[in-house]
Image: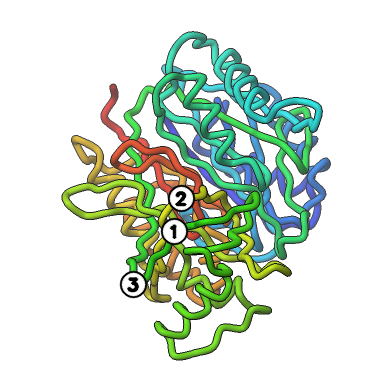
Amino acid sequence: MRIATSSSTDLNAASAVKAIKEEIRKKISSPSLMLVYYTETQDVQSIKNEFKKQFPDTYIIGCSSCRGTMTDKGYVGGHNIAAWAVQDESGAYGSALCNLSSENDVFLQAKQVLQRAIDSSGRPGELPALITLHTTPGHEETILRAITSELGVNVPIIGGTAADDGVSGNWSLFDSDNVTSNGIAMAVFFPSARVSYSFHSGYAPLGDSAVATRIDGRTLLELNGQPAAEVYANWFQSATGRVIDNDDLFAQSTLFPLGRQTGIIHGMPYYTLSHPASVSEDGGIQMFCNLGEGETVHFMSGTTEMLVSRAGRVVDSANDHDKNPRDPIGGIAIYCAGCMLHVRDSLNDVAANMSLSMHQAPFICPFTFGEQGQFLGGEIAHGNLMISAVLFHKDEL
């Protein structure tokens, strides 16, 4: 199993993809699977066509990333494409994409995408060692339930919700044949190398909590029977001494999200985070993920320094999680776009920390509007302000 990465800032799609091919071919002659991440400034149809032309026998899925990408070669901001490729003659890989139709059930469509991806791998009836999931915003929890329902057990997932530069709907997904702004893309891995994983928030509860007593879709309307935005504002002022600006809620809440306890490991609780996005007209808080009525939400806190160092720590955790840690041959990471925007002046440090923890092995990392992963306790979740990582190890199965 061999892994290679490449990226390009070339404004011309054809020359950008050709340059990526030339660099990847220095290490890999015929990729089994490619993951491609790109900014909204790209002509997605053009880059899709070019990747299909340059890699006609490779399974490919692409997902838009917020304002840049990151690889083992560092952080690249602005207009760019980054690609991750694996060649594994002893393994098997497959992928599938669908454009979500309002006429069909999302749960059913997600199961169909997963089954098509598995069928394309030539391993029908087998459980993949890993699933890479990319979807456009809105149905992440339903899609995760569909995956678990189809497989019957939780399989490690690394995923990220397609992003754009300004939450304006300019996100997209593609495979070798299609482009969509409302869809699901999955890749399945049956690798010859062992996979380890980690999914972390890194934030801590400050003590305030309340029950979600009224929900409307992804809008948290009431906490303990009171307007959610009012309760949150009181928590924020008590913690910071500042009055929150509702017009700047997305930015100001990055270090103070809401969390739901997902499990306990070694006596310590861990949380799935939800990022407040904006205040609704009726005093609710619009979120980037679903909450359930009756769930307890905690007021969480993080620091800028933590957001910079956390990427490396999550990779370290994935390596420690492996039963026999070895230098990885490569990896994939997902880093929240909200966190990225908060630490944008330190992204070279984030990349350096991650590369150090990867032992300089090739990796790729987009910036997404939601993160999906598997906690060490086994739970599969969709959250915000999270980081997910998987590593592939030299020791074979």
Graded by Cα atoms within 10 Å as few (under 14), some (14 to 19) or many (20 or more), the crowding at tag 2 reads some
Query: N-terminal of the two: label 2 or label 1?
Result: 1
Which residue is found at the position 35% from the left and 59% from the top? 312
Q: Quadrant of residue 247?
A: bottom right
Q: Earlier in the sequence, mark 3 or mark 2?
A: 3
Residue 138 placement (x, y as % from top left) = 66, 46
Whether residue 124 is situated above or below residue 146 in the rendered picture: above
Distance Cα–Cα, label 3 vs label 2: 20 Å
Identify the element where label 3 is drawn. strand
Circles 2 and 1: CB distance less than 8 Å?
Answer: yes
Q: Which residue: 28% across, 52% down?
A: 316
Label for residue 211?
1
Instruction: Choose between 3 and 371: the one closer to the eye.
Output: 371
Alpha carbons under labels 2 and 1: distance apart = 6 Å
Query: Residue at coordinates 41% horizontally, 84% vertically from top-left?
Result: 238
User: Quick check: 351 left or right of 142?
Assistant: left
**Cβ atoms at labels 3 and 1 below 8 Å apart:** no
Closer-to-camera residue (203/4):
203
Residue type of the residue flagged with mark 1 = Val
Query: Which residue carries the number 3 mark?
Result: 206
Between discs 3 and 1, the one toward the N terminus: 3
**Residue type at numbered disc 2:** Gly
Residue 181 image-quadrant placement: top right
Position in image of residue 271 (x %, y %)? 37, 54
